[in-house]
Amino acid sequence: MKTKLPLAIFLALCTAFILVQISVNAIAQNYTAVHFFFGFAAPLAFGCVPFQVFKWRGWTKLPVNYEWAGWSWSPLVGIVTTLFVSAFNEVYTDPMENGIPFLQAWHHLAADVAGVVLFWAVYVLFLRPRFTRHPAPKFIGSTQ
């Protein structure tokens, strides 16, 4: 769907996270909650990525306001990309770079998945009805 609302929500959530991080240092206090936040917020941004990568026109032709309206967003693409990035991070990157075995950090992946599940619930309950505008039914023989 063509909308800027998911990116606006993502930026608002990131701003709120930065404010919380500055005030209480959420990453040090509860790293699992940060993974939950990633699972909840990342599909909003990742839902735009595959559609825009192939439309890249270089640094000299960055999108301007009228082009932003043409960006497509897909919640399923966002969810699949978020789950892939989360699984790759926890199963491959963390054991290789940080020496943390997956069996000791599986709860981070579980928190990412829980955040994605919450994202899907919020999308189905609040965002999808806003994006889906069903036209009035046309009856056979009507002149409308």
Image (cartoon, helix red, strand yellow):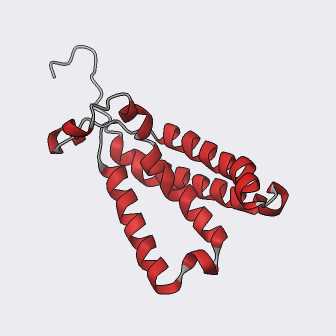
Q: Residue at x 36, y 39 (%)?
A: 132
Q: Residue at x 55, y 64 (%)?
A: 37
* Vertical placement of residue 38 versus 33, above or below: above
Question: Which is more toward the observer, 116 or 50?
Answer: 50
Q: Residue at x 46, y 85 (%)?
A: 23
Q: Looking at the image, how many numbered discs can be counted on the residues?
A: 0
Q: Quadrant of residue 19?
A: bottom left
Q: Quadrant of residue 33?
A: bottom right
Q: Position of residue 36 (x, y in %)?
A: 60, 63
Q: Residue furthest right?
A: 103
* Vertical placement of residue 67 versus 16, above or below: above
Q: Is residue 111 left or right of residue 13?
A: right
Q: Residue furthest bottom?
A: 23
Q: Residue furthest top?
A: 141
* Vertical placement of residue 102 versus 131, above or below: below
Q: Position of residue 44 (x, y in %)?
A: 44, 50
Q: Is residue 105 something that shows in the picture?
A: yes
The N terminus is located in which quarter?
top left
